[in-house]
Image (cartoon, rainbow, N blue to C red):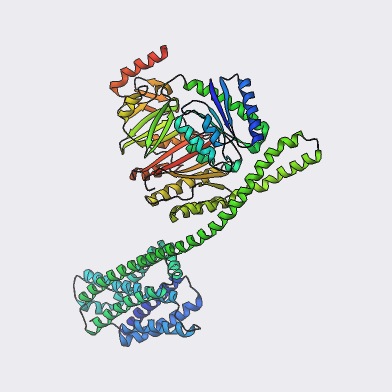
């Protein structure tokens, strides 16, 4: 055991608590002068207590803060974000503090070429200074690393809050922290040698890291699970909505079709008639037709006939993306039922790329329409994405990647599609330029 | 003399179109005759002669059967792959992309555009059909056929530029035509035998010399109208030079 002067001990304790609090503030990004002063006061008080009770003061310190925040909040409850942040801060700081002390020890032993604790007592002033300095360096490195992952951490926290995992995360981190403290306190009481304590700490640090990794994994898993569940509910509601829209759309379409045929047939009578009034009236009605043209928008309802949630979901999503960009995504789904059961993930990815390409391209031209047509018969499904192209778009440049092995031109994401198609045996891609349109068709064999 | 078929269920419109077609034949001095004018699917099928090369003007919706025109077109396409099919229809009956995939019609005429436009388009289509039908009647193998799953696909021989295979995707043939890139499973050897007009310039390339532009016999590089190139194997070099010089002399 090394006996260290009480002033130096106080400084070390103070440093430990104060840097913990600052780390905590950093996690929450809540620096201000009031906090700063109160942090100094609390750290001093508990640093002083630490002179009498060894490492238990850390536990007392944490309990005090929890109690204070519980009492100050109305109604009484623990703020999970603050609590978790504090636990992580103290765990990280204790680990860094301990390793800083051990590093300083080793430095001193090497400098004096003598492995005796007496040296540390002799040079205790320098020893404490050095170990605190090393601790500051560790802190700086830790902050640099943390900064790199700041956005991921924020995202993770958003997920934790969204799915109400705060309590679980808090319990898990508190559990690890308490176990950690227990080891420190018992090794103090039992006066274990520094070497054994160092190993205990090392092993514990590894456990700590692994636990936190597991924690992140756990949060991600829960998040994915919840998202999937939400999607199912969302899809169900959408289906119900689509059914009603489909019905209305069918009725209007029927009317529109009759109307157009009647108008066309009437034209020859009107042309042969002498009545100017009749002719004017006819023209007025023909001009009304533009309002009818918009009816086609209802055709998103056709998507109900696709039985794969993933594929339907993707097309719906792209439909609204297109709409938000003033692009019309036409759907041609004339069959009552489309069944998909193989390679759905790959189909979704390829379809996503094809639709994105088409939407991106038509943004640059005047005719802002993209068509998605699906036909299914005789165990073959064809999904065609069609968009108009401008004359100056060279057919050869589109295909260049297709039949030279070098993938220089990746503007159409075709290289990715090619790779995915090569991974399976039942997908085929066909590209055709016709009537000023480009049609990309994914042919799927089987699974009907 | 090739036949023209007209299928339209509205009496007044049918009368008009028949008039336009007769007019179009006269204007183009075409070797075509308006053989059948019908208003129902049953009447059409009575007149219909399978595997007869011809020009078909079809309405899509016949007597409230929304897919009648499409079904007939599918049948015609199956019987006579090179038949010239034109749809005359209202805008919203038309699933253009689906039609293009299933039928690949020669033209779509939209009723909404008015009678003058319809007349104009019919005249133009008669001219195009006349040219196409004349061209196809000269050669026996006009189409290259391939199969994906249970479905047959065909591409005009004249349009084909090359068929090739790639080492990383064994068993798959890629086909490049003037306006199309497709793929299917098969072996080049079969196609080399079945389509003798195509030239095997190396192990993995079977090309259509009709669409080749230049050949550099030093680098043994053959170029095509779409600016793609292909290397000719040493063994095939002489054969190719001979073929090309024969072609030039003709």
Compared across the picture, whether B167 is left or right of B86 comes to left
| Quadrant holding the C terminus of chain B | top left
Residue A258, image x and y in percent? 64, 45
Q: Point out residue A155 in the picture as x, y percentages from the top left corner.
A: 44, 64
Numbered circles on residues, count: 0
**Residue B181, can we see it?**
yes
> Is residue A404 shown to the viewer in this render?
no
Which residue is nearer to you in this view: A330 or A259?
Answer: A259
- Residue at position x 25%, y 71% in the image: A202
In the image, A259: left or right of A82?
right
**Towards the viewer: B162 or A410:** B162
- Residue closest to the far top: B249
- On the image, the x and y values in percent for residue B210 come to 42, 21
For residue A132, which quarter of the picture?
Answer: bottom left
Q: Is residue B22 above or below residue A345?
A: above
Q: Is residue B223 above or below residue B14?
A: above
> Residue, x 38% and y 14% (percent of image)?
B245
For this view, does B74 lie left or right of residue B195? right
Q: Quadrant of residue B199?
A: top left
Work out whether residue B208 or residue A443 is closer to the camera in this orientation and state it.
A443
Q: Residue furthest bottom?
A: A52
Does residue A261 sit above or below A338 in this rendering? above
- Residue located 49% across and 82% down the image: A73
């Amino acid at each position: 055991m090394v006996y260290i002067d009480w002033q130096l001990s106080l400084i070390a304790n103070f440093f430990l608590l104060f840097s913990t609090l600052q780390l905590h503030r950093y996690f929450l990004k809540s620096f201000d002068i009031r906090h700063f002063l109160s942090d100094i006061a609390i750290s001093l008080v508990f640093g002083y207590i630490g002179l009498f009770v060894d490492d238990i003061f850390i536990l007392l310190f944490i309990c005090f803060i929890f109690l204070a925040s519980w009492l100050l909040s109305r109604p009484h409850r623990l703020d999970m974000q603050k609590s978790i942040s504090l636990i992580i801060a103290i765990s990280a700081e204790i680990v860094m503090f301990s390793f800083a002390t051990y590093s300083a020890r080793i430095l001193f032993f090497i400098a004096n070429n003598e492995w005796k604790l007496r040296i540390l007592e002799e040079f205790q002033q320098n020893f404490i200074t050095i170990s605190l300095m090393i601790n500051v360096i560790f802190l700086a490195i830790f902050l640099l690393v943390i900064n790199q992952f700041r956005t991921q951490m924020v995202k993770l926290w958003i997920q934790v809050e969204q799915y109400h995992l705060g309590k679980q995360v808090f319990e898990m981190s508190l559990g690890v922290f308490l176990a950690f403290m227990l080891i420190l306190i018992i090794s103090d009481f039992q006066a274990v040698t520094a070497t054994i304590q160092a190993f205990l700490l090392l092993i514990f640090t590894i456990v700590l890291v692994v636990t936190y990794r597991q924690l992140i994994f756990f949060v991600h898993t829960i998040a994915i699970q919840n998202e999937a569940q939400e999607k199912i509910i969302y899809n169900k509601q959408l289906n119900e909505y689509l059914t009603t829209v489909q019905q209305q759309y069918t009725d209007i379409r029927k009317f529109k079709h009759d109307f157009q045929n009647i108008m066309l047939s009437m034209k020859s009578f009107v042309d042969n008639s002498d009545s100017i009034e009749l002719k004017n009236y006819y023209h007025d009605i023909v001009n009304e037709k533009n309002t009818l043209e918009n009816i086609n928008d209802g055709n998103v309802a056709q998507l109900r006939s696709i039985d794969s949630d993933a594929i339907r979901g993707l097309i719906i999503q792209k439909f609204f993306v297109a709409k938000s960009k003033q692009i019309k995504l036409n759907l041609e789904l004339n069959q009552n039922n489309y069944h998909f059961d193989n390679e759905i993930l790959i189909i979704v990815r390829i379809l996503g790329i094809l639709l994105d390409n088409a939407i991106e391209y038509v943004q640059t031209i005047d005719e802002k329409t993209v068509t998605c047509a699906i036909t299914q018969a005789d165990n073959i499904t064809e999904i065609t994405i069609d968009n108009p192209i401008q004359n100056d778009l060279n057919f050869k440049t589109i295909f260049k990647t297709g039949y030279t092995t070098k993938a220089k031109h990746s503007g159409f994401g075709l290289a990715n599609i090619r790779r995915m198609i090569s991974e399976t045996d039942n997908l085929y891609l066909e590209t055709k330029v016709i009537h000023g349109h480009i049609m990309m068709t994914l042919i799927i064999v089987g699974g009907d | 003399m090739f036949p023209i078929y007209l299928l339209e269920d509205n009496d007044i419109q049918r009368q008009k179109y028949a008039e336009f077609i007769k007019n179009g034949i006269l204007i183009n001095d075409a070797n075509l005759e308006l053989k059948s004018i019908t208003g129902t699917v049953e009447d059409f099928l009575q007149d219909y002669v399978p595997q007869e090369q011809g020009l078909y003007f079809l309405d899509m919706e016949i007597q409230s059967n929304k897919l009648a025109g499409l079904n007939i077109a599918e049948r015609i396409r199956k019987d006579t792959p090179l038949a010239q099919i034109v749809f005359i229809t209202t805008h919203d009956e038309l699933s253009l992309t689906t039609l293009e995939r299933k039928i690949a019609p020669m033209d779509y005429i939209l009723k909404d555009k008015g009678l003058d436009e319809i007349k104009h388009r019919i005249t133009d289509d008669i001219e195009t059909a006349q040219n196409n039908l004349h061209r196809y009647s000269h050669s026996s193998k006009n189409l290259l056929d391939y199969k994906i799953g249970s479905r047959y696909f065909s591409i005009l021989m004249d349009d084909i530029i090359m068929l090739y295979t790639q080492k990383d995707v064994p068993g798959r043939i890629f086909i490049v035509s003037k306006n199309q890139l497709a793929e299917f499973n098969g072996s080049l050897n079969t196609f080399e035998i079945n389509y003798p007009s195509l030239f095997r310039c190396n192990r993995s390339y079977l090309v259509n010399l009709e669409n080749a532009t230049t050949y550099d016999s030093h680098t043994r590089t053959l170029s095509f109208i779409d600016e793609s190139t292909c290397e000719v194997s040493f063994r095939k070099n002489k054969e190719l030079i001979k073929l090309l010089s024969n072609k030039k002399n003709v």
